[in-house]
């Protein structure tokens, strides 16, 4: 499984992306509102930033799974899913995001 496959797995099997994006966009909008009108970003720019942040988040999760489990990059998506489910990784991530404060 690669990072793109992990991202797809997360999106299809949890509400992690929705929760992450809601909190990230709220924080980015708050920061943007504090800027002077001349340098404020539009919604597309903010969305692009949030998308990049989610991609980075998934990359970090991927690396932590690789280093903390017996999985390798060449293992099948089915093997990855089995380990992710057994370790309750998605459940733990959902709880972590729900409890997180995304303020600077």
Image: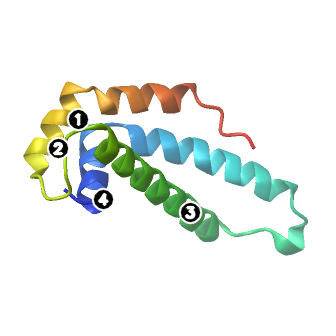
Q: Nearer the viewer, mark 1 or mark 3?
A: 1
Residue that carries the numbered disc 2 in the rendered image: 80
Q: Position of residue 20 (x, y in %)?
A: 50, 43
Q: Secondary structure at mark 2?
A: helix
Numbered label attached to residue 84: 1
Quadrant location of the C terminus? top right
First reached walking from the N terminus: tag 3 or tag 4:
4
Whether residues under marks 1 and 2 lie with C-beta atoms below 8 angstroms apart, the answer is yes
- 13 or 93, which is in the foreground? 93
* In the image, residue 85 above or below residue 19: above
Quadrant location of the N terminus? bottom left
Q: Secondary structure at mark 4?
A: helix
* In the image, residue 8 above or below residue 15: below
First reached walking from the N terminus: tag 3 or tag 2:
3
Residue that carries the numbered disc 3 in the rendered image: 47
Residue that carries the numbered disc 4 in the rendered image: 3
In space, the residues marked 4 and 2 are separated at their CA atoms by 11 Å
Residue drawn 23% across the image and 57% down it: 5
Whether residues under marks 1 and 3 lie with C-beta atoms below 8 angstroms apart, the answer is no
First reached walking from the N terminus: tag 1 or tag 3:
3
In space, the residues marked 4 and 1 are separated at their CA atoms by 14 Å
Please tell me how crowded label 3 is: few (under 14), some (14-19), or many (20+) other residues with Cα within 10 Å: some
Numbered label attached to residue 40: none
In space, the residues marked 3 and 2 are separated at their CA atoms by 29 Å
């Amino acid at each position: 499984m690669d990072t793109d496959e992990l991202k797809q797995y997360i999106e299809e099997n949890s509400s992690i992306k929705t929760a992450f994006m809601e909190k990230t966009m709220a924080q980015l909008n708050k920061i943007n509102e504090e800027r002077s009108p001349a340098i404020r970003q539009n919604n597309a720019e903010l969305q692009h930033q949030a998308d990049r942040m989610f991609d980075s988040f998934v990359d970090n999760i991927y690396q932590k799974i690789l280093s903390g489990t017996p999985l390798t990059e060449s293992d099948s998506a089915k093997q990855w899913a089995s380990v992710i489910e057994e370790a309750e990784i998605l459940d733990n991530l959902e709880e972590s995001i729900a409890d997180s404060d995304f303020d600077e």
